[in-house]
Amino acid sequence: MEAILAPPDLLYESYQEAYNALKTHGIEHGYGFVLKRSKPHNSDVKTRYYYHCDRFRTYQSSAKKLNTSTRSTGCPFKLVIFKRA
């Protein structure tokens, strides 16, 4: 498995700016992100967004005759976007 380059550790003015930078970086390097969870639960104002690589699952093929493949590689990469006061 090839190494995935992490996005730069920068400060942004808003969540949307940080998300757009993350998305652009992922597109440039051939991967994406999936929102795992956001905190605090049951609140309209979120302070933390937890993302992980879209390839995080480990693929278990159940095919008997066909040779199947997937993007899932067990990628351990995780990222948190959080609001600073």
Image (cartoon, grey):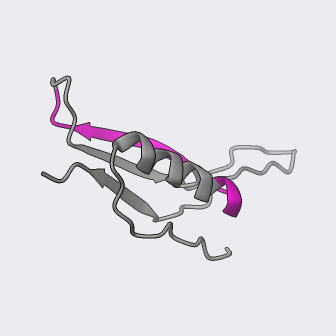
Q: Number of labelled discs?
A: 0
**In magenta stretch: residue 40:** yes
Classify residue 30 as left or right of residue 20. Answer: right
Image coordinates for residue 72, horizontal then vertical, percent: 63, 53
Image coordinates for residue 17, horizontal then vertical, percent: 44, 46
Say which residue appears at 54% left-offset and 61% top-offset: 74
For the view shown, which residue lies furthest in the right direction? 66
Q: In which quarter of the image is residue 16?
A: top left
Is 30 drawn above or below residue 70 in the view shown?
Answer: below
Say which residue appears at 77% left-offset and 51% top-offset: 69
Residue 59 visible within the image:
no
Q: In which quarter of the image is residue 9?
A: bottom left
Is 66 drawn above or below residue 11 in the view shown?
Answer: above
- Return the residue nearer the eye: 24 or 38: 24
Question: Which contiguous range is marked in magenta?
Answer: 27-41
For the view shown, which residue lies furthest in the left direction? 85
Say which residue appears at 53% left-offset and 63% top-offset: 75
For the view shown, which residue lies furthest in the front direction? 13
Classify residue 2 as left or right of residue 32. Answer: right
**In magenta stretch: residue 69:** no
Classify residue 66 as left or right of residue 2. Answer: right
Q: Quadrant of residue 29?
A: bottom right
Residue 70 visible within the image:
yes
Is 40 drawn above or below residue 9 in the view shown?
Answer: above
Figure quadrant of the N terminus: bottom right
Say which residue appears at 38% left-offset and 66% top-offset: 10
